[in-house]
Image (tube, rainbow, N blue to C red):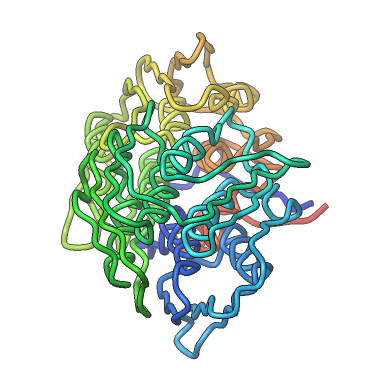
Amino acid sequence: MDYFQIRGGTPLQGRIPISGAKNAALPILAATLLTDKVSTLSNVPHLNDITTMVELLGALGADVAIDESMALQVSAAQLNNQRAPYELVKTMRASILVMGPLLARFGKAEVSFPGGCAIGSRPVDLHLKGFEAMGACIDVRDGYIVATTESGLKGCDFTFDTVTVGGTENLLMAAVLAEGRTVLRNAAREPEITDLVAFLRGMGAEIEGDDTSTLVIDGVSELAASHYSVMPDRIEAGTFLVAAAATRGRITVENANAEHLGIVLEKLRDAGVNVTVEGNTITADMTEGQLTSVDLITAPYPGFPTDMQAQFTALNVVAEGVGRITETIFENRLMQAHEMSRMGANITVDGHSVIIRGKSSIDGAPVMASDLRASASLVIAGLAAKGETHVDRIYHIDRGYERIEEKLQAVGADIVRKSR
């Protein structure tokens, strides 16, 4: 099993290119199932989750190839299977996103209950309620969700009980081929959904209301071929900016979109970090001044993203003062706190919050990642600590960060991937 060996204490300095966003690429890959024409995608990150989604598309009968420019070409013209197997779905939550496209195009979809990180319950009931509102029949057989419709999906007016990114994406994809108009209310507003909308529009879908909580979709009979470049990964960019702050360094991230990181950049500035934006670059400079703890509460976009909560926990650990971080999205997403305590961090878990009393330094230690973003936060803590840190179970981090150790090495980090 691979692990990271990190020798901390070195301020990071330099420039890091940001990869395409995993959380945008995954639904866009699922959306290629909506047409029998060829879809060409660029700026797709090379990650384990992307590989899993490509394998899932192949298992359904799609033909996926990489051209000379490293763009993915997907042809779903010869799809011969509407069953997403447990062996693939169990490893990745986003596998459920093939249900909407399959149901819309073929009138049938069978998807095993999805897996992924152990960060709490992420039920798919809102996906299924939405499909039922569009005329689908839902059944559960042998661990599979089976959705069928005899006369095709029909447009509907559907309100999500709670904001759900995956549910919004799934119903949005189903609605573009449904008969009539669909209105999705209390929809998620994440930039990755806006990216999916842009991709679908490029295929000929008729969608209004992107960047708002109400999406209006007028179904079309078919979708066309498309060429699309996936948006940059805002969470990867935010992670490296926090690493710069925690190590008292200076990092510029390239190919980033500051508009997607509004509240994250605000919190970095609140912490005393000098943040500057020039075009598609963002610089975090903590080479001077005092790093100060911040309070934050996670919330759906445009609130503070749950995917950045763990990284700010690491920042607060080595900052001046007391900070309180409250997680409102997932109930088990504070597990990194226990591992950071092994490094000498002063952290108290209080229900869905952690109270962190910052210290001038922490010590390296063996720690274990529990999920994707927790693993990134432990890497940041290791980079800021004195001595050597071993981060185990880094297969989690490989799901969401492309070549993270290489990018960190390029800005001065002493981090090496090793195998036991």
Would you place residue 341 above or below residue 49 in this image? above
Q: Residue at x 53, y 32 (%)?
A: 125
Total of numbered circles in the picture? 0
Residue 71 appears left or right of 344: left
Nearest to the observer: residue 40 or residue 67: 40
Horizontal and vertical percent position of residue 203: 32, 72
Residue 166 appears left or right of 264: right
Horizontal and vertical percent position of residue 385: 54, 35
Q: Residue furthest bottom?
A: 68
Horizontal and vertical percent position of residue 230: 37, 66
Horizontal and vertical percent position of residue 252: 30, 57
Nearest to the observer: residue 107 or residue 67: 107
Image quadrant where residue 93 sits: top right
Q: Residue at x 43, y 32 (%)?
A: 309
Would you place residue 369 above or below residue 191 in this image? above
Q: Residue furthest front?
A: 151
Q: Residue at x 45, y 63 (%)?
A: 31
Nearest to the observer: residue 84 or residue 221: 221
Q: Residue furthest right?
A: 420
Residue 11 appears left or right of 216: right
Nearest to the observer: residue 49 or residue 312: 49
